[in-house]
Image (cartoon, rainbow, N blue to C red):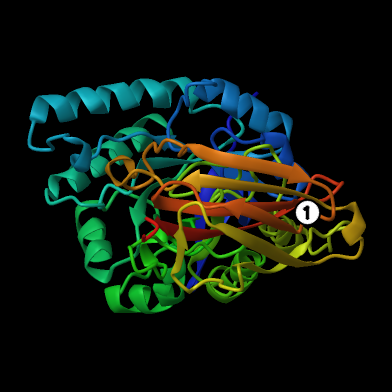
Amino acid sequence: MKPSKVELKRQSQKYQLSIDDKPFYIKGAGLELGSIKSLADYGGNAFRTWRVANGEKSGLQILDEAYEHGLMVCMGLDVARQRHGFDYSDKQAVAEQLAAMEQDVLALKDHPALLMWGIGNELNLRHSNPKVWNAVNDISTMIHRLDPNHPTTTMLAGAEPDVIKLVVSRCPDLDLLSFQLYGEIDQLPDFIAQSGFSGAYTVSEWGATGHWESPCTDWGRPFEANSSVKADCYYQRYLDYIAADRQQCLGSFVFLWGQKQERTPSWYGVFLEQGQYTESAQVMGMLWTERTPEQPVAKLLSLNIDGQEAPASIYLTEKETYTARVAIDYNEPQSLSYQWELLKEVDRKLESDGGDFEPRPDSVWRQLGGSKLDRVEFAAPEPGEYRLFVQVLDTHGGAATANLPVLVETATI
């Protein structure tokens, strides 16, 4: 196998990636522990990783599997973050990191499934030492010295104009930038215009509105949109802010082709814990292939507890009984099944920062049943913060989801 020749070409004001002289538009996803085959089945053509080895597969194994399924990989290099304690004024530590990255590049640079190198992830998040960008530029320079066939980028949290200007000034060796935005993606065109950035970019993370930018309960817990509201967001955001820019945007990597716990088990993945696909996964497949799914998942219309639904702050009293109801739209409602679960909220001391690991909160109770379980009665547990989840499962492997945060209070005598 010989390396693919990936080039960033510019004609007039339009940028275009090419692989072995054939135009390539990124229809990609963030995928580290999800199914590579599944992404290909849905019409994706690329994915990005956050590191070379993810604990389950080596970088070479990831590239081999991608190649087997016809996908290209933006290989992430896990550059240390200041917010985790790395000091970019420590010349020896920076030099050691550069040497380690060089070994990764040498090991993987000639693989035909390699698309580009992603140098670090959100290094601007809560950082104050601009020397990190000098280190990024040095890594990019090293890559270009060893690997003439693949572009380099770095993944930025957001797209603030001042950050773009700083990175452009300190990282002249980068071939393109990559921006990561969620609800704020509607500001991306303005951010780019204000920064004066005229180069190429990818949107390397985007998807559901982030927990940090969502409305909250009176006690400060964010409301998560249900699966159908999310799917509408994926559809509109892709068309309006990714596909709409055919001048500078090279494509995108939707987040996340898989599942992870971040505030809830269902917030960011387009798949669920047990592997069911959501409406958002089907939307991405439709956008990539222009084909309507044969078996659309159920549309989730509403979830309420005794008539209260988001964005109301819902208070319950311990030991009292309540009824939760979910409303759906589906052509064969009798074939659906339901899974209800009450989880404790994530301990605030254990909440992740910037996508770091976060433990799944404890389950209080769970109830599964057939098509008649579109409502469930439950007694409120001991006082505390909880979240009631429902999954509406079809017989084809799809699911609709919703949840409501609740605060259980002590009964008054």
Provide residue 208's location: percent of width, then percent of height. Answer: 53, 61
Determine which quarter of the picture holds residue 276: top right
Secondary element under disc 1, as helix, strand or loop, is loop
Foreground residue among 375 and 242: 375
Residue in the image at 56% along x and 32% along y: 33
Find the residue positioned furthest to the front: 413
Q: Do we see residue 23 in this rendering?
A: no
Provide residue 296's location: percent of width, then percent of height. Answer: 82, 60
| Quadrant of image for the N terminus | top right
Provide residue 341's location: percent of width, then percent of height. Answer: 61, 46
Q: Do we see residue 390 in this rendering?
A: yes
- Are there few (<14), some (14-19), or many (20+) residues within 10 Å of tag 1? some
Q: Which amino acid does label 1 sit on?
A: Leu
Residue in the image at 48% along x and 42% along y: 261
Residue in the image at 33% along x and 63% along y: 219
Residue in the image at 12% along x and 51% along y: 128
154 horizontally vs 26: left or right: left
389 horizontally vs 294: left or right: left
Provide residue 210's location: percent of width, then percent of height. Answer: 43, 61
| Quadrant of image for the C terminus | bottom left
Foreground residue among 253 and 380: 380
Query: Which residue lies under the disc numbered 1?
Result: 373
202 horizontally vs 392: left or right: left
Foreground residue among 324 and 44: 324
Determine which quarter of the picture holds residue 145: top left
Foreground residue among 315 and 27: 315
Q: Is residue 61 above or below residue 212?
A: above
Q: How many labels does the image show?
A: 1
Q: Is residue 109 above or below residue 295?
A: above
